[in-house]
Amino acid sequence: MNCSELHTLEDYLDGTLPEEECRRFERHLKACASCQQAVEQEKSLQNLIKSQLQLKAPPDFQRRILKGLMAEESPRLVPDWLWASGLGLVVAVIGLLVGKVGNQFVQKVARGIGDLASRTRLMDYFDNLGSLLQSDWLNQLYGGSNVLMLNFVVAGIILCWGLWQMVKALRG
Amino acid sequence: MAFSDDNAPEEELIRRAKQGDQRAFGQLVERYQDQVYTLACRTLGQKDRAEDVAQEAFIRSWRAISGFRGQSKFSSWLYRITLNSCFSELRRQRRSSENITEEELEFLKIPNPTNSNFVSNLEKHDLVEKLLKRLPPVYRSIVILHYLQGLDCQEISQVTDRPVGTVKAYLHRARAHLRDSAVQLLKTRDPNR
């Protein structure tokens, strides 16, 4: 088709043409045989699609869905991302409290475990991890315990996962 | 006065479904089952899996309805979940639009001496369905959302999570494809035309 109004025609068929532009195009349409033909084709296509492609759901479709729902729990009032973020936060707070209040106790336990773990070089791993992640403010926060440092890392991972779920939920 | 679910406004049914009322959700299923089933069937291009996928879409929407905030129409939200289920299924099958069967291709190529017009040919042989199947799934879904469900480009953009410009481009290409295929088909069937 050679008409210079081709782009306007497409917008007209899409129903996205502004009202004033639409009126102007309809005036053009009365005088343009190729646009008229295109509009007729579009109408035929639309009618065909409506008459041939619309389907009816199978007769017992709704009943089977309802049966499926019976096996489901009620929709969750608290979404997954909130659970995950909350869990991450709780783990982080527990880590903080334990770090402040019970650091010595944890270190005793850690030393006990360390005696056991020294044979398997497990403590070397924790020491290396601690020296990698250590900083002044972190040191104050977790009281120098590598076990607690690990606690914060785990809490951070859960928190990030929860936030990621939240982003996905908001986008979805 | 007895409360009738049949006539309940959609917003009321959604509110009750959010609170766990399965009967209210059942009413929403009844209202949208044909549209969701059609969208699934036409996007997948196969009826045998469409029923399961449409069913899965409703179950997923039941699980997620507490997160529906009414920022879009309920139907758009439901179509979006349906399309996500369809594309998951297609990925699972690794089935693409190129996988149109040889039989279908042959059917489109067979010259037909009958000198009837294109529209009646399409009607007689269900060719619209076959032409639609030759499009990639995302194009099929846009055609169905536009022509059957009556969504405009803005709404389709929300459902498919694609920019409006992309939706318009896809719709134009799909329309051109259907038109060109139709003309080509007519020529094949009736070379003197």
Image: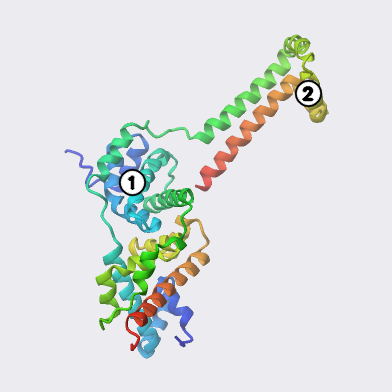
Compared with residue B139, is residue B60 higher up or lower down, i.e. above or below? above
The part of the image, by quadrant, that contains residue B171 is: bottom left
Report the chain holding disc 2.
Answer: A
Foreground residue, B15 or B142?
B142
Instruction: Please give the count of numbered marks on the rendered protein.
Output: 2
Report the chain holding disc 1.
Answer: B
Residue projecting furthest to the left: B1
Picture residue at 28% right of the left edge, 47% below the top: B9
B134 vs A60, left or right, is: right
Q: Which mark is residue B11?
A: 1
**Residue placed under numbered mark 2 in the picture:** A125
Compared with residue A83, is residue B132 higher up or lower down, i.e. above or below? below
Q: Position of residue B101 (x, y in %)?
A: 40, 62
**Can residue B61 be seen?**
yes
Q: Position of residue A123 (x, y in %)?
A: 78, 18
The image quadrant where one finds the C terminus of chain B is: bottom left
The image quadrant where one finds the N terminus of chain B is: top left
Q: Position of residue B26 (x, y in %)?
A: 28, 41
A72 vs A58, left or right, is: right
The part of the image, by quadrant, that contains residue B42 is: bottom left
Circle 1: residue type: Glu
Picture residue at 29% right of the left edge, 38% below the top: A66
Q: Same chain for marks 2 and 1?
A: no
The part of the image, by quadrant, that contains residue B46 is: bottom left
Foreground residue, B81 or A115?
A115
Circle 2: residue type: Tyr
Q: Which mark is residue A168?
A: none
Picture residue at 55% right of the left edge, 40% below the top: A166
